[in-house]
Amino acid sequence: MDHRHELDLPATAALLGVPTQAVARWVRKGVLPAVTRNGKTWFDRIKVETWARKMGMRVREPAKRPQLEGEEGSPVNPVLAAIHRGGLVPDLPGGSVEETFANLVRSIPLPASLPPEELEQHLLERESLGTTGVGDGVAMPHPRQPLSSHIDEPRIYVARLREPVGFKAIDGQPVTLLLLILSTSLKNHLALLSRVVHLLRTPKLRQDLEEADDLDQLLLLLEADLES
Amino acid sequence: MARPFGRFREAIGNVQSDFAVLALVGIIVGLGSGVAGLGLHIGLAGIRPEVEGIHDRLPWLFPLLPAVGALASWWILDRLTHYKGRGISDVIWSAYREGGHMPRESMFTQMLGSVLTVGLGGSAGPEGPIAFTGAAIGSNVGTAFRLSEKRRTTLLCCGVAGACSAIFNAPVTGMFFAIEVVMGQWVSTQVLPIALSSVVANLVALAFIGKDQTIFEVPVYETGTFDLAFCLGLALLAGLSSFLLQRGIHLSNAAFKRLPVRPWARPFIGGLLVGLIGIALPQVLAEGYSETESLLNGELTLGLWVVALVFVAKAVATSLTLGSGGCGGIFAPTLLVGASLGTLYHGFLSQVFPGAEIAKVGAYAVLGMAAVLGSTLHAPVTAIFMVAEITGSPITGTGDLLIPLIVVTAAATLVTQHLWPGSFYHRKLEERAGSQGIALDARILADLGLDELIEPVQTSLEEDMTVAKAHDVVVDCDLDLYPVIDRDGRYLGMVRSLYLLSVDRTAATLMLVSDLMDARWPVVQDDARPATLFALFEQNDCSVAPVVDADGKVRGNIRAESFLRRYHQELLVHTAR
């Protein structure tokens, strides 16, 4: 027998998006096809999906593990985690907003499904609606829609500009620091944005963003200063 | 349990085709219930001559026998089993609500009980108990094979069909009784296993009892157009009699419950009263088959007045026997009540319309029997087939009696339905279910556990938290409502995130979460029945309610939206074919 597509009870419950008790009851009643081997219940994924369609239920992708946790399971600041997944561009050339974006999207690694031109287009579209220059020499460019079809988890890229660029920022100051925010959902976009704003208000943390030599040092500095 | 059987059992359970499994196991159930039917038949046949012997030698002892029988069967049922189930209504309950589960000892307790109650003269039939026994056999075979509840419920119906088929020598009746009364719906995949079981049980019984054994030997009757018209009057009377009989059992039951005596004394008193009636009218004792048969043959040796007395006395004796807790069925008594009603009606007709061409009196007895049976069970199809089968005629051989038979049974059922909705069995069922009812809706809600509906709340706010601090929490969690708890973690009320966020930064540092909290938000106790949730959401016009345990701790939320989604899923799963 082919056991490759077999699921156990919790996996089936997750697939159907119902509590495990419900799946257990459906098996007990004999309405959901299952087999028993050595006293344990197994489900054929294909059969379960066919059955779910018949019942008008939606089949869910297996839930992804929430990634906002450190290695020992301690919670890590989501901004740090996002910067860790993104990166640092220490010296970004460009004289105008357009040039800066063109250089930025080509100096960071992007998933194959997301060509740099497309991201550039997204960023320019957002910028045309209103500046992302939040003042104090910082801009936070981001696409208008979450990128959940391209990336699994939010990323932040920190870029220092070679020369200041006029971003029509709210305080009129030219921008020297870019934080490119790529989110996967509206919810984590809001959470990240509000945390980043909070972070920038603290002069010490702002200084870390400006001065760290590389990504590892930046993360270490931010972590240390966030705790104090 | 031996391992080879365990393997075999797993293999059986893993066969995906319901039909293959049920056909195989249905035959086993048919064998078992056939043997049970045979056992009851032999038991009754063995005890009757003894009882009649006592009657001849010690007539003064006579009224005591039904009392002793009822008491003994009460003792058996009370001592040998904790299961409260007693009759067909409990079989239906098990099929509807308990996934077809019945305890093991039910396979013999009712059988012993009914041999004692009916064998010693209690006015009841052996069919209820044997159907119950058959159901228990089907259920326990299903459990032994660890079959799913759906399959086990079908086996339970197989058992009922087999038992009825064996005891009445009526395979079609067995099938229809199981489908019409117990299952309550027609599911084509389940019909065949039930039919198989019925046939197998019938063959088992026939092999021992003999081929041409029918309960009643009845000649073929001719009927005319007049009879068809007169049928309507009979239907009206039969519906009324059925209503009065059921009402009588109901009242007698209520009266016996109020009697200030120990529980064991009730069946004893009931049996004693029946015995006293039996001194004057021995026809009303036991299941009354021989009396019924002579009526069906139109033999009126004692005259119409005696028939009228039997009609009333049988109804009273049955009410006393069943109402006091004796062990037996309502099937056989309705046959005698119906047959005597038909006979009386014929007598009335021949007085009022002396010139009219009406059928023989026996034909009316047959019609009355079918009408009262059908309207008591609220199962006209079962009654029609039953009468056709037990009167010894091949299905169509009832001659042209078949047409009035159908008309009178259907019409009588209509009358009773109007007077007292719900069959004899469903009445009891509804009493047991209480306010929940037995509709599909109630069954779904009874299945859903509250635990399945609770969505855990990761975040609650403390009452003395400032709104500013709450802002930070709210930004991270995507919820519209948060439970507010005190320092010991006990639930206090709910707060809307909208209210929290609409407070500006400066004010937020001064305000506390408890200032914005709604303490009168509806709360669900964690032992509440899901059936109450609809009313809760509707009455309070809310879409989320916190679930709180006995210590006042929040266990989570229930959202109306996900509750409805789960309910709808269960509805589809329940009704899927």
Image: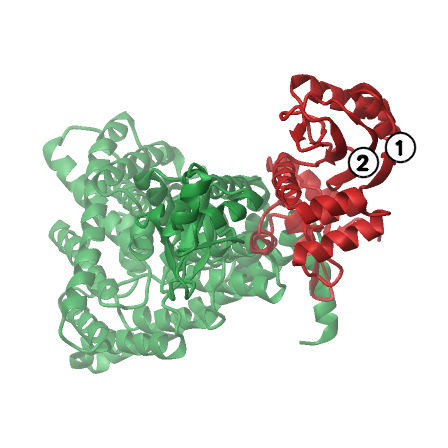
Chain colours: A red, B green
**In terms of image quadrants, where is residue A54?**
top right
Chain holding disc 2: A
Image x and y of residue B153, in percent: 52, 54
Could you say which is closer to the camera, residue B397 or residue A64?
A: A64
Q: Look at mark 2 in the image and give the residue it sits on.
A: A159
Could you say which is closer to the camera, residue B476 or residue A180?
A: A180
Q: Residues within 10 Å of mark 1 (few under 14, many from 20)?
A: some
- Mark 1 or mark 2: name the one nearer the start of the chain: 1
The kind of residue tagged 1 is: Ser
The kind of residue tagged 2 is: Ala
Q: Residues within 10 Å of mark 2 (few under 14, many from 20)?
A: many
CB under 8 Å between callouts 1 and 2?
yes
Please give the name of the residue rendered at 34% of the width and 39% of the height, measured from the top-left corner. Answer: B538
Q: Which label lies toward us, 1 or 2?
A: 2
Q: CA distance from mark 1 to mark 2?
A: 10 Å
Could you say which is closer to the camera, residue B304 or residue A49?
A: A49
Q: Look at mark 1 in the image and give the residue it sits on.
A: A107
Image x and y of residue B50, in percent: 32, 78
Is label 1 in a helix, a strand or a loop?
A: loop
**In terms of image quadrants, where is residue B357?**
top left
Compared with B456, B396 (above or below) is: above
Chain holding disc 1: A
Please give the name of the residue rendered at 70% of the width and 47% of the height, measured from the top-left corner. Answer: A205
Compared with A35, B269 (above or below) is: below
